[in-house]
Image (spheres, rainbow, N blue to C red):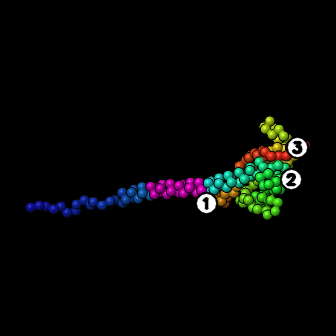
Amino acid sequence: MKIIKTGSKNKGFTILEMTATLLIVAMLSGLAGLFITNVVRAYAMYQENKEVAQKARFVINRLVNEFVHITKVIKSSETQIQFISRFNNQTEMTIKYEKNTLKIDNVMKRNIVFADKIYDFKLRYTKSDEVFDDINKNIWTNKWTDKSTAIQFDISFIVNPYLKTENKKHIVTFYNITTVPRFLESKK
């Protein structure tokens, strides 16, 4: 005859084991959440940088192309330049910065908004015709002179972030972009 033992050991989990398991699962979930958050932030930053790079490349290339084809500067300041352009069939052009936009005016005075979300735009012109002879000198001024042979500009773009952060906007700036007009009228 077999004797069956009653009150055999319970095969369940203790509350301590369950608590430890839940803590481990919670920590792993938290780490996974941080990882996913960082991946999403990195992707958003990549998108912001990609958009700014594309816009900056387009705007800077167009400005350099306009400046290279200048045959004569009529009027200039820190935020505006009026000139005759070989690129546009010797027409009078004006590039000016106002109210976070960069505008290009042509002879028909259409006042075309060329780029928006521009945080800042500054133009500088050489003081002498010896542009790159001595880089230690302060050779730049806010006005074009008879001896000027180069244009330099700084441009800053406003980037609206994809993710809500403390900063409502980011600023990306490109400094000291220098152009030497190839077709300037000879000085008399």
- Disc 1 residue type? Tyr
Pointer 2: what residue? 75
Q: Residue drawn at (79%, 63%), measured in percent from left and top?
A: 110
The magenta stretch is 27-47
Q: Residue 173 placed where, x, y %?
A: 70, 51
Residue type pointed to by label 3: Lys
Q: Is residue 35 left or right of residue 98?
A: left
Q: Is residue 178 left or right of residue 129?
A: left
Earlier-in-chain disc, 3 versus 1: 1
Residue situated in front as seen by the camera: 153 or 159: 153
Counting residues from the N terminus, which is met first, the one under dot 2 or under dot 1? Answer: 2
Dominant secondary-structure state across the stretch colored magenta: helix
Judged from the image, the secondary structure of the residue bearing numbered disc 2 is strand
Circles 2 and 1 in contact, beta carbons < 8 Å: no
Q: Residue furthest left?
A: 1
Q: Quadrant of the N terminus?
A: bottom left
**On the image, numbered disc 3 is attached to which residue?**
187
The residue drawn where x is 82% and y is 43% is 149
Towards the viewer: 118 or 171: 118
Which marked residue is nearer to the observer: mark 3 or mark 1?
Answer: 3
Disc 3 to disc 2, C-alpha distance: 16 Å
Q: Residues within 10 Å of mark 1 (few under 14, many from 20)?
A: some
Residue 61 appears in view:
yes
Q: Nearer the viewer, residue 4 or 46?
A: 46
Q: Is residue 128 above or below residue 174?
A: above
Residue beneath disc 1: 162
Q: Amino acid at mark 2?
A: Lys
